């Protein structure tokens, strides 16, 4: 097992890609800390699935846009498991908005969760990892940060910041034997996307070179790779897990318009 007895904290693990990664690292022997902000039922479902594998798990509530809650979350995990070996920064919000309708509130909410939250989660986890001989930080981004995608300017900007942050933290944390890497999923069949557009898989599958969208479970492998010793000489790197979408760059604008209308006026 690639992560046997490793302590892995995953933010936003109550659903979607985070839930799939949590189950994936548990299958590789990890002890798993499941973070959620508001979806307690989803977090409980993730925990039940991991417990059914015979793995240790815990649930920890925290809004990662709040630095004090981040610190509290880290303390809870250390109190239970003694350390943190791997942090997977998965939590994020989209903030759909027409470019000229972007408000300061939307900007702040998206940036506070996606960029500030990822930075301070990484910083607090790194303090713990440094005391225990090192570790791995894995950021989950988006290929929207590589292409201009309509109605997602704030989201893409926040994730682009994570790409730059990955390089900076990798250099600064390398002497402490802490690796920092990022992978960026492409179109994936998570609940949020399917709710925005019931035809999501067909719409996006038509523009992806592999002619399909991803199952969330397909994101567990890249996360495990970056978390484990299989990537022991990798740090500061970014790669895309997108069926070739960033290579072709085709975008179904009808889906983007529909998603905007469904989310218009809602908080991210």
Image (cartoon, rainbow, N blue to C red):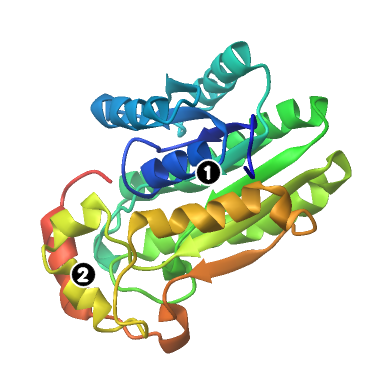
Tell me the number on the disc at residue 66.
none
> As drawn, is 222 to the left or to the right of 114?
right
| Extreme residue toward the right, this view | 175
Q: Is residue 7 something that shows in the picture?
A: yes
Q: Find the distance from the CA under tag 1 to the CA under tag 2.
A: 25 Å
- Which of the 4 image quarters holds residue 183? bottom right
x, y percentage for residue 47?
A: 37, 27
x, y percentage for residue 232?
A: 77, 53
> As drawn, is 154 to the left or to the right of 125?
left
- Which of the 4 image quarters holds residue 222? bottom right
x, y percentage for residue 52?
A: 37, 27
Marks 1 and 2 in Cβ contact (< 8 Å): no
Q: Residue at x 52, y 47 (%)?
A: 115
x, y percentage for residue 48?
A: 33, 26
Residue 81 against residue 179 in the figure, above or below: above
Report which residue position mark 2 lands on.
201
Earlier residue among tags 1 and 2: 1
> As drawn, is 255 to the left or to the right of 76?
left
Residue 207 against residue 91 in the figure, above or below: below
Report which residue position mark 1 lands on.
89
- Residue at disc 2, secondary structure: helix
Q: Residue at x 79, y 36 (%)?
A: 134
Q: Residue at x 49, y 74 (%)?
A: 146
- Dot 2: within a 10 Å radius of its alpha carbon, few (fewer than 14), some, or many (20 or more) residues? some
- Residue at disc 1, secondary structure: strand
Q: Nearer the viewer, mark 1 or mark 2?
A: 2
- Which of the 4 image quarters holds residue 62? top left
Depth order, front residue of 192/84: 84
């Amino acid at each position: 097992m690639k992560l046997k007895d490793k302590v892995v904290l995953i933010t936003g693990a109550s659903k979607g890609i985070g839930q799939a990664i949590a189950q994936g690292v548990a299958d590789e022997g990890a002890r798993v800390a499941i973070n959620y902000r508001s979806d307690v039922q989803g977090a409980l479902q993730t925990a039940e699935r991991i417990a059914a594998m015979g793995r240790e798990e815990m649930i920890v509530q925290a809004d990662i846009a709040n630095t004090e809650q981040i610190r509290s979350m880290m303390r809870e995990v250390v109190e239970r498991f003694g350390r943190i070996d791997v942090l997977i920064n998965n939590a994020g919000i989209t903030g759909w908005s027409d470019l000229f309708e972007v408000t300061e509130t939307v900007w702040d909410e998206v940036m506070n969760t996606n960029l500030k939250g990822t930075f301070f989660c990484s910083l607090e986890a790194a303090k713990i990892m440094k005391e225990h001989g090192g570790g791995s930080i894995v950021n989950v981004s988006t290929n929207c940060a590589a292409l201009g995608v309509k109605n997602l300017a704030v989201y893409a900007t926040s994730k682009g910041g994570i790409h730059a942050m990955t390089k900076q933290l990798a250099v600064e944390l390398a002497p402490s034997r802490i690796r920092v890497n990022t992978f960026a999923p492409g179109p994936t069949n998570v609940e949020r996307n399917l709710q925005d557009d019931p035809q999501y898989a067909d719409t996006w599958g038509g523009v992806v070179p592999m002619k399909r969208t991803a199952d969330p479970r397909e994101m567990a492998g890249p996360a495990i790779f970056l978390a484990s010793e299989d990537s022991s000489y990798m740090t500061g790197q970014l790669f895309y897990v997108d069926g070739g979408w960033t290579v072709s760059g085709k975008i179904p604008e009808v889906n983007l318009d529909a998603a905007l209308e469904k989310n218009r006026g809602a908080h991210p």
